[in-house]
Image (cartoon, rainbow, N blue to C red):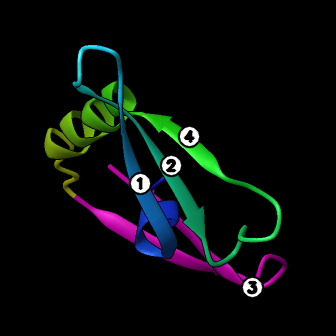
Amino acid sequence: MANQFIHARTCFLLQDKSRNWSDCLVVSDYDKDDFIWRIPVTEIKALFELAAGDFPNEVEATLNTKKQDYDITTS
């Protein structure tokens, strides 16, 4: 999900009937022709709380030539 925000071309916040923030609409560079992501604000909040409590002791990055990207492992 972070990738959608980092590469967002457009991002809008929506309000519900009580005028509280309810959802975020995101269009990323990668998906601009295929998808508009609708992400509930409660999900964004939960992900921030999860990330804030994640303190890895060790990080290892190994190049995966098949994917042309790194495989990341933490402990």
Please give the residue where the numbered disc 1 appears in the rendered image.
12
Please give the residue where the numbered disc 2 appears in the rendered image.
25
Q: CA distance from mark 2 to mark 4?
A: 5 Å
Query: Around disc 2, counting alpha carbons within 10 Å, would you say few (fewer than 14), some (14 to 19), or many (20 or more)?
Result: some
Q: CA distance from mark 2 to mark 1?
A: 5 Å
Mark 1 or mark 3, earlier in chain? 1
Query: Around disc 1, counting alpha carbons within 10 Å, would you say few (fewer than 14), some (14 to 19), or many (20 or more)?
Result: few
Please give the residue where the numbered disc 4 appears in the rendered image.
38
Q: CA distance from mark 1 to mark 4?
A: 10 Å
Does residue 30 belong to the magenta stretch?
Answer: no
Find numbered disc 4 in the image and state the secondary structure of the residue it sits on: strand
Residue 44 is marked as none
Q: Nearer the viewer, mark 4 or mark 3?
A: 4
Mark 2 or mark 4, earlier in chain? 2
Highlighted magenta segment, given as a residue range: 58-75
Q: CA distance from mark 3 to mark 2?
A: 30 Å
Query: Around disc 4, counting alpha carbons within 10 Å, would you say few (fewer than 14), some (14 to 19), or many (20 or more)?
Result: some
Horizontal arrangement in the rendering, residue 73 relative to residue 33 (left or right): left
Residue at 81%, 70% (x, y): give it. 33
For the residues bearing labels 4 and 3, Cβ distance under 8 angstroms: no
The relative height of residue 56 versus residue 10 in the rendered view (above or below) is above
Work out whether residue 10 or residue 53 is closer to the camera in this orientation and state it: 10
Horizontal arrangement in the rendering, residue 38 relative to residue 68 (left or right): left
Find numbered disc 3 in the image and state the secondary structure of the residue it sits on: loop
Q: Position of residue 66 (x, y in %)?
A: 84, 79
Please give the residue where the numbered disc 3 appears in the rendered image.
68
For the residues bearing labels 2 and 4, Cβ distance under 8 angstroms: yes
Quarter of the image where one finds residue 51: top left
Instruction: Inspect the image, locate mark 4, and give the three-letter code of the amino acid beneath it.
Output: Arg
Instruction: Inspect the image, locate mark 1, and give the three-letter code of the amino acid beneath it.
Output: Phe
